[in-house]
């Protein structure tokens, strides 16, 4: 959640808008306003505020329609939604069925507004923390496989070209056997930190399982291979044993539209092929050989 939480107020009553905006800004919130339901929806989609206060009765797109649209949008459904209404309490059930999280009654009571906004933001923050915890790998802090699967699906839907890279540590079992699991864990954490620090949004590194990592990469293959070399060199400077990372990739092209499953299968096959050949390669020739192989006839080229 941003340091200054953003609150969107949607109401066709200018006086009510001014009262709420003035009070909420005084409380330290960043306040956005919309004078009708349609513009409120557009503002929510553009700004993605942490909390929305929306009047029930408005001409055109009314409050329940706004609420239903917000809660039906995967990108907006976690926004805490408060109805503002002078209607009877019997309408609360209908509002809850539309997805509302709370109600504020008119005439406006600043104490009630302040308390409900604070409570809503606290709940949102707690839910986000739980979701983040559930989507993270405990050892490395990277996103886990479940989050990776969802992110890859979204990337495919967006249609922008990218690379899916699968990487794992050469002879990682030997590292664990010879140096112990504590050193092996430290190695994986250092790898995760070094690799992820070199990515640019929306690129992402996830721990796919064991010593295997998945990377969503929006730059060209040569820069990905250079990143791999930098990570290997950084690890070799920290740990007293030979370091090697095998890598396989698949390319998503808008005109080809491979499915997430097909991309992962392609990247897995490429990783297996490189890992098999790396086992047979001499250490001095391994780096040049593997990069010629990837650049020369990689998948999707």
Image (cartoon, rainbow, N blue to C red):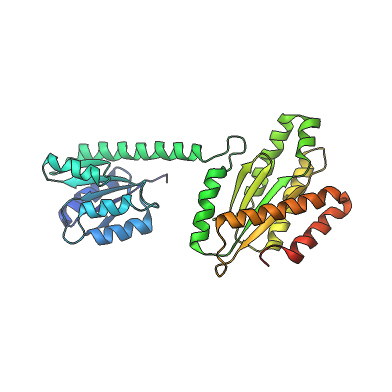
Task: Please tell me which residue is depicted at 73% across the width and 57% down the height of the picture.
Answer: 226
Locate the N terminus and report the quarter of the image it occupies.
top left
x, y percent for residue 170: 77, 44
x, y percent for residue 13: 16, 56
* Quarter occupied by residue 265: bottom right
Most distant residue in the left direction: 88
* Quarter occupied by residue 46: bottom left
x, y percent for residue 63: 21, 52
> Can residue 293 be seen?
yes
In-image side of 2 versus 208 (left or right): left
Most distant residue in the bottom direction: 255
Q: How many marks?
A: 0
> Can residue 31 be seen?
no
Task: Please tell me which residue is depicted at 65% across the width and 43% down the height of the picture.
Answer: 192
In-image side of 240 versus 47 (left or right): right
Locate the C terminus and report the quarter of the image it occupies.
bottom right
Task: Please tell me which residue is depicted at 39% across the width and 51% down the height of the picture.
Answer: 74
Task: Please tell me which residue is depicted at 25% across the width and 50% down the height of the picture.
Answer: 21
In-image side of 9 versus 290 (left or right): left
Q: Nearer the viewer, residue 97 or 178?
A: 97
x, y percent for residue 171: 79, 41
């Amino acid at each position: 959640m941003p340091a200054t939480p953003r609150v969107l107020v949607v109401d066709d009553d200018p006086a009510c808008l001014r009262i709420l905006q003035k009070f909420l800004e005084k409380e330290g919130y960043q306040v956005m306003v919309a004078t009708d339901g349609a513009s409120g929806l557009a503002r929510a989609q553009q700004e993605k505020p942490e909390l929305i206060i929306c009047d029930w009765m408005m001409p055109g797109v009314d409050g329940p329609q706004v609420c239903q649209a917000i809660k039906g949008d995967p990108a907006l459904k976690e926004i805490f939604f408060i109805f503002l209404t002078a209607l009877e309490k019997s309408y609360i059930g209908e509002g809850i069925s539309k997805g509302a999280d709370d109600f504020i009654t008119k005439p406006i009571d600043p104490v009630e507004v302040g308390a409900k906004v604070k409570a809503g933001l606290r709940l949102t923050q707690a839910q986000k923390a739980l979701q983040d915890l559930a989507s993270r790998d405990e050892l490395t802090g990277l996103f886990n496989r479940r989050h990776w699967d969802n992110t890859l699906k979204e990337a495919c839907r967006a249609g922008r070209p990218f690379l899916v890279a699968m990487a794992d540590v050469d002879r990682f079992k030997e590292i664990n056997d010879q140096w112990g699991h504590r050193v092996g864990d430290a190695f994986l954490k250092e790898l995760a930190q070094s690799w992820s620090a070199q990515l640019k949004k929306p690129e992402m590194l996830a721990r796919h399982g064991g010593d295997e990592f998945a990377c969503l990469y929006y730059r060209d293959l040569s820069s990905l291979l250079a990143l791999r070399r930098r990570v290997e060199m950084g690890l070799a400077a920290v740990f007293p044993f030979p370091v090697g990372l095998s890598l396989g990739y698949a390319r998503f092209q808008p005109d080809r539209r491979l499915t997430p499953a097909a991309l992962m299968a392609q990247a897995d096959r490429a990783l297996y092929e490189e890992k098999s050949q790396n086992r047979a390669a001499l250490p001095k020739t391994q780096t040049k050989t593997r990069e010629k192989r990837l650049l020369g006839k990689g998948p999707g080229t």
